Image (cartoon, helix red, strand yellow):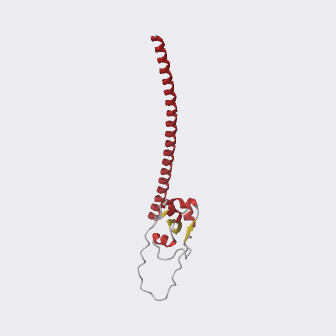
Amino acid sequence: MAGSTQRRRLKVFRHSIGFHDAYIAAPSQKAALAAWGAESDLFARGLAERVEDPDLMREPLANPGKVIRRLRGTSAEQIAALPADAPRPRAPRTAKAAPTTPPPEPRPDHSAVDRAERDMAELETRHRKAQAALAQRQADLDHERRALRASQQDESAKARTALDKARATYERAMQNWRR
């Protein structure tokens, strides 16, 4: 009873993080912000919201207080949403030769992280599907076991009745024979 009351008080909130949405089942916006580690009010800035969709609420409500990350869209959809690279404007040339500074180091390549995140999201999806299939198989086996048990009990009851009847007939025949 206490668990169901607590579950009714939980709300599900969503915040976008890069290519992922972070879901949390928490009693309040303040608790959700704390779980996300947010330093500002993401709700006031329109960057977080309450979720009402039952399909999106199911997993966070099953894991209250745990941040659930879900990949938003397919890789192709995410790449299509990226802005096109715009050419960088060149600095105007001056007549005086200015001392040259070495060019900045190039930004580290993030593609390995993107691939690993994509692989992790696919792995989590595959694991969830495998667990669901296994749970369905277990439910089917449980149903089959109950049906078999009921059928066997019916057969045993009929066989017991037939055995009792055969013994009674035999006993009567033996009594008549002994006379």
In the image shown, does 109 or 58 lie closer to the viewer? Answer: 58
Q: Residue at x 46, y 69 (%)?
A: 35
Is residue 130 depicted above or below 145 in this figure?
below
Q: Nearer the viewer, residue 1 or 98?
A: 1
Q: Image quadrant of residue 101?
A: bottom left
Q: Which residue is situated farthest in the bottom direction here?
A: 96
Residue 72 spot, x, y in % from top left: 54, 63
Q: Indicate the position of residue 161 as horizontal and vertical percent values.
A: 51, 26
Q: Position of residue 131 (x, y in %)?
A: 48, 51
Q: Residue at x 52, y 34 (%)?
A: 151
Pick out the residue farthest to the right. 53
- Residue farthest toward the front in the current orientation of the protein: 179
Q: Is residue 164 visible?
A: yes
Looking at the image, residue 75 lies above or below residue 163: below
Residue 87's place in the image compared with 158, above or below, is below
Q: Residue at x 46, y 14 (%)?
A: 175
- Residue at the image point whose x is 54% and y is 74% from the top: 43
In this view, the residue in front, 98 or 73, is 73
| Image position, residue 146 (x, y; %) | 50, 40
Total marks in image? 0
